[in-house]
Image: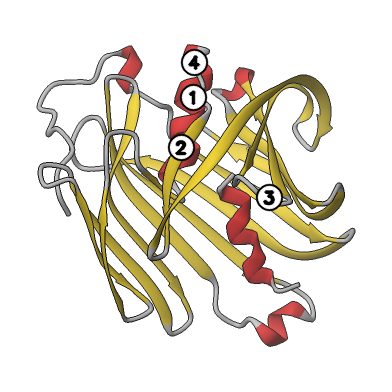
Amino acid sequence: MSIRGFTALLLAATAAAPAATAAPDADDAIAPFSAHYVASWKSIDVGTSDLELKGDTEPGHYVYTWTITARGIFRLAYRDDLIQTSWFGISGGHARPIKYHAVDGPASVNLDFDWDAGRARGTSETKPVDLTIKDGTQDVMSIQVEVMLDLRKGNLPKTFQIIDKDQLKEFVYTREGTASIRTALGILDTVIVSSQRPGNNRILRMWFAPSLGFVPVQAERSRDGKLEFAMRIRTLKR
C-alpha cells in the first residue's frame, strides 16, 4: 500500500465566496491551529502528517494546508511531499471553497470554484476539469473544516458532495457516538464520525475533540473491518 493512500484520510479537497468586509460573527469563525500527526500502516510508522489552518487576507477567509512526508524505507520510493491546500470562506456557519491546489511530485490538481456560475474548473494531472457544483459542495480539504463546523452546531448532514481530483463523489457521513481516548495530548473526550462512499467497503473514521475546537486527533481507515491506515496526533499549537 503506497503512502499516497493517506489522501483518503481526509475524505472521510478563484471565484469568490461572499467577500466579507467586517469581522465575522461567532458562527463564521474558526480558530487557526497547526497539528502534527504520525501515520502508520499495519502498525508500521510510515510517515508524518501536518495540518495548518490560518487566516487569509480577508476576514472570514482561511487557508488550510495538509503536508504528508514519507519516512523510513517509504522515503526511498516517495521523495516528494504530498501537499494539498484549500482556500475557503465561512459564511452562515458553513465552509465554501474558493480554490484548491495539490502537488505530488510532477502531478498536480488545480481547481477554481465559480459559485455564481455553479462550476468548478481547472486541471487534474493535465486533464481539464469542469464540474457542476451546488451549495455545500466541498473539496477534499474544506470538507474537514465543514465537518468541524457542523459538529460544533450539532447538525451534521448525512451526505456530502466532494470533488476528488476530476470527479464529484458522494460520501455518507455518520456520527457514531463519543469516546474517551488516550492521545499524546492526554485523555480526550471525542466525537466519532465515519465516512464512506455508497457501495464501497472502505470506511474512514475520525475522532474530533470538542475541547480543542473539534480539531481531529485521530483517524483510521479500514477495509472489510480490517485496519489499513491510522493517523494519530502528536502535537497541537493554537
Please say if the residues under marks 1 and 2 sit with CB atoms less than 8 Å apart.
yes
* Front: mark 1 or 3: 1
Residue holding disc 3: 37
The local secondary structure at tag 3 comes to strand
Task: Give me the residue at 10% from left, 27% from top.
Answer: 21
Q: Is 6 in front, or is 56?
A: 6
Counting from the top left corner in percent of width and height, residue 197 is at: 59, 47
Q: Amino acid at mark 2?
A: Phe
Residue 197: mark in rendering: none
Q: CA distance from mark 1 to mark 2?
A: 7 Å
Q: Earlier in the sequence, mark 2 or mark 3?
A: 3
> Disc 2 marks which residue?
160
Structural crowding at the residue carrying mark 4, measured as other residues with C-alpha within 10 Å and reported as few (<14), some (14–19) or many (≥20) = few
Cβ atoms under marks 1 and 4 closer than 8 Å: yes
Name which residue type carries label 3: Tyr
Q: Residue at x 57, y 36 (%)?
A: 172
The residues bearing labels 4 and 2 have C-alpha atoms spaced at a distance of 13 Å
The first of marks 1 and 3 along the sequence is 3
Residue 232: image x %, image y %?
74, 45
